Image (cartoon, helix red, strand yellow):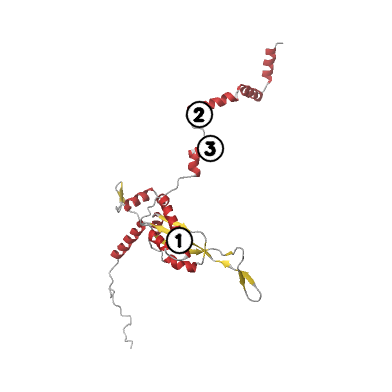
Amino acid sequence: MSVDYRRRQAEMTKTDEERERDRLNEALDRYDAGTETEKLVEQVDGAEQKAITMPEDDAELMARIRPEPKTALDHYLGPLRKAVYLKQTTGVEDLLIKGKKYKLKLTKREKELIEPSVWLKSNTQRGSVKKVTPFLRSLRRMNIHRAIAHCHFNTKAIARDMEKLLYRGIDEAKAMGIPEKGMYIEQIWSGKEPKAKAVQPFLKDIKGRGRMGIMKRKEHHVQVILKTPVTKSRIAKEKEAKMINKKPWIPVTNKPIYDKSGAYYTW
């Protein structure tokens, strides 16, 4: 009996599953991992695709984890409202699109958020809010350069720190693309910080009946909001429009007279 006859007999007795398994084994024997890898590399090189070795090289990944920062207009206004707002800021009252006129009305809060501004916060400083507040009130509505000069020649200790804080505000405005010319202090205030125990040596707080405590320092921080002439001009226009639309004052109101006493005398 020949070998070929025995092989044919063995194949006839195999099931379909066994035949499929043998076919897959033969295909795996013919597969060369090195050759297949070289083919894939050639395909990538042929498509002129850059191999990504670092996360910074993947533009799609970086766009997801580090998206580009949005401006205030993109964040708070949609495409149509943004187009109408840009038209109105150039002097046009409404926008004409496909025969329709659009006019934008923003709330006071939206106007404050959209207009360019710089927010600053100082580090924790020693001192009480009660002593700092009168000096901070003198800087309100003041031009930033004039406020810096005012802090430079003031004898209070808080003035030195405020001068540095305002200089930092100018640097941040330049980084954001806001011109420093005409910038002024819109709001400035101070807030309390949690009282912390004094470091060594401790300051003893002697009390009565043999008791003793530890003095705690008073600390505060200062926050500033800087605005541009855009806000100042908008406030001036709103004030002027309010005065124009105000009704004239009349000493005697034009109302009908009613006899509230009735048909009888009250004396």
Count neighbours of disc 2 (C-alpha within 10 A) and say few if under 14, some if 14 to 19, many if 20 or more. Answer: few
- Identify which residue, 160 or 24, lies in the foreground: 160
Disc 2 secondary structure class: helix
What residue did someone put label 3 on? 54
Residue plotted at (30% across, 63% down): 240
In the rendered image, which quarter is residue 36 located in?
top right
Q: Does dot 3 land on a helix, a strand or a loop?
A: loop
**Nearest the eye: 40 or 252:** 40
Q: Which kind of residue does numbered mark 1 sit on?
A: Met
**Residue 232 position in % (x across, y down):** 35, 59
> With 45 as the anchor, is 237 left or right in this view?
left
Q: Earlier in the sequence, mark 1 or mark 2?
A: 2
The amino acid type, in three-letter code, at marker 2 is Val
Q: Residues within 10 Å of mark 3 (few under 14, many from 20)?
A: few
Say whether residue 102 is visible: no
Task: Inspect this view and state whether residue 211 appears.
Answer: yes
Residue 25 placement, left or right of 122: right
Q: Quadrant of residue 9?
A: top right
Looking at the picture, does residue 172 appear above or below residue 29?
Answer: below
Q: Amino acid at mark 3?
A: Met
Residue picked out by circle 1: 162
Percent x, y for residue 84? 34, 51
Is residue 214 positioned above or below 111 on the image?
below
